[in-house]
Amino acid sequence: MAELQAMTALGAHDPARVVCGPLTITERIDVALASVATRRGKDLTKAAKAAGVPLAEPGCHLRGMPYCTFWTAPEMWFVEAPFDSHERIAEILKSDLGDAASITEQTDAWVILDLAADDLSPLLERLCNVDFAGQPVGHATRTMIDHLGCYLIKQGPGAARVYGPRSSAQSLLHALEAAAASVW
């Protein structure tokens, strides 16, 4: 019988950490992710509150314990939680939210890259159409980075999280590295 070994989105056994001048890019494999959508005629707000799932407003990322959320579309959110305690996040949320929501496992569909530098604005203005400097901490939006549909979350003036398609993880990392080389 074959022995399967877990691989990160970037194809390694351990998460990647890349330094490009003052920029550090860290692959995150410790986040479980699910999409949650309100079912027609159901009250997701009440069920989410009872389950401790904060539902973010459009353009926002909300932190909670153990769940964080960001808005993705009307009546739809991505829900994040620590992977160690929520490896089966979709099942947990289905149990907690009942028939108020439709839930889809998303953990292995996305690569998560945390970006850190003193100021990410010069980098991000080369990569996407988001006014990163002008947005408040907690801003979350969908944008294009190097022709890839990504989510960008502002965690601070020098901190951001990028969700990109797992199938294009290497291309996304290359785009970040190339832009960093042109900035710094």
Image (tube, rainbow, N blue to C red):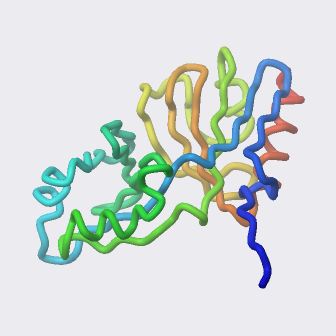
How many numbered marks, from 0 up? 0
Q: Quadrant of the N terminus?
A: bottom right
**Which residue is more in the foreground, 83 or 138?**
83
Where in the figure is residue 151, as x and y percent of width and height?
55, 49
Q: Would you identify the image quadrant in which residue 93 lies?
A: bottom left
Where in the figure is residue 127, as x and y percent of width and height?
72, 40
User: Could you tell me which residue is drawn at 19 percent across and 72 percent down?
Assistant: 98
User: Could you tell me which residue is drawn at 84 percent across and 37 percent down?
Assistant: 177
Q: Quadrant of the C terminus?
A: top right
Q: Residue furthest bottom?
A: 1
User: Could you tell me which residue is drawn at 22 percent across and 63 percent down?
Assistant: 96
2 relative position to 96: left or right: right
Where in the figure is residue 161, as x and y percent of width and height?
58, 39
37 relative position to 45: left or right: right
**Which residue is more in the foreground, 154 or 5?**
5
Residue 136's place in the image compared with 40, above or below, is above
Residue 159's place in the image compared with 149, above or below, is above
**Which residue is more in the foreground, 130 or 108?**
108
**Which residue is more in the foreground, 42 or 124?**
42
Q: Residue furthest front?
A: 1
User: Could you tell me which residue is drawn at 59 percent across and 50 percent down?
Assistant: 163
Q: Would you identify the image quadrant in which residue 10 lies?
A: bottom right
Where in the figure is residue 100, as x and y percent of width and height?
18, 71
